Amino acid sequence: MVCKRKGAGLPACPPCKQPRCAAGAAEPEAAACQCPAEPQPCALPSAADGAGSGGAAPPRCPAGSGGGGGGRSLSPPPPPAEDEREKEGVKERSGEASCEEPLEHPPGDGCREPPPPPDINQLPPSILLKIFSNLSLNERCLSASLVCKYWRDLCLDFQFWKQLDLSSRQQVTDELLEKIASRSQNITEINISDCRNVSDTGVCILACKCPGLLRYTAYRCKQLSDASIMAVASQCPLLQKVHVGNQDRLTDEGLKQLGSKCKELKDIHFGQCYKISDEGMIIIAKGCLKLQRIYMQENKLK
């Protein structure tokens, strides 16, 4: 706004104090403070300009665009391009891969894998047979033999079987006793109680194949006769224990053979053998001087 009194030669009026005037005056300052002016590039003087000006100083950069001391301002380095950043990322990944590579190919003895656990099947068969000899018949046949074929063959190897408990098994026949006796001649104790399919023939074969038999048990085998006990007595002179209770067909003839052949006999059981008389027991008492235990029940002794 132009003051009218200025052209008439009169003194100028005082500044206007209305809000619109004050706001109008403050706008340029605010505008000047909001955004700094962009730096203007300095124009380099040409040779002609320097000659024409008589060696005058070259023009300087606009104020605020240069650094301290009036020198040329250096702009900051531009950010790295995307290609360079990708290359750096590839280098970092390759560095990580190179660090992980020694794990796949461990250098030296310190990074070797631990040895595998020992295999029990690498033991000699004799050691495994010794271990299996501590198991019962059920544990050998029903548990250990089901682990693998190798263990089955070992468990069914009767060479290490010394004590056989075949009682109450109707699958036991004369043929099975013959196979067992043929493969294992080290049997020292056998129990065939309640095996109804075993006859005198099977017991005779067993006695012939196993002369080291020490304990013979055959309760309630009513199909057996004197032939079986006579074969055991004549073929197994080291016999120490004979339990043949409840055999209706056993007579004094079998006891006479025991008394004359088995000098090591210590324990006998003839309960419910109704055909045994005093004659048979007298022969046993005279021949078996090491006898320690006699069990007689429901016998016809006088």
Image (cartoon, rainbow, N blue to C red):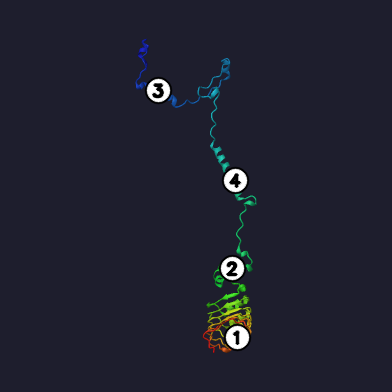
Kind of element beneath mark 1: helix
From this view, report whether residue 58 is shown above or below residue 250. above
Where residue 35 appears, x then y in whole percent? 45, 27
Q: Residues within 10 Å of mark 2 (few under 14, many from 20)?
A: many
In space, the residues marked 2 and 1 are separated at their CA atoms by: 47 Å
Q: Residue flagged by tag 2: what amino acid is it?
A: Trp
User: In the structure shown, which secondary structural element does the residue marked by tag 3 occupy?
Assistant: helix
Mark with earlier residue (1, 3): 3
Residue tagged 4: 99
For disc 2, the marked residue is: 151
Q: Quadrant of the N terminus?
A: top left
Q: Which residue is mark 1?
A: 285
Q: Label 3 amino acid?
A: Ala
- For disc 1, the neighbor class at 10 Å (few under 14, some 14 to 19, many from 20) is few
Q: Residue furthest top?
A: 9
Label number found at residue 26: 3
For badge 4, the amino acid type reads Cys
Q: Is residue 149 above or below residue 14?
A: below
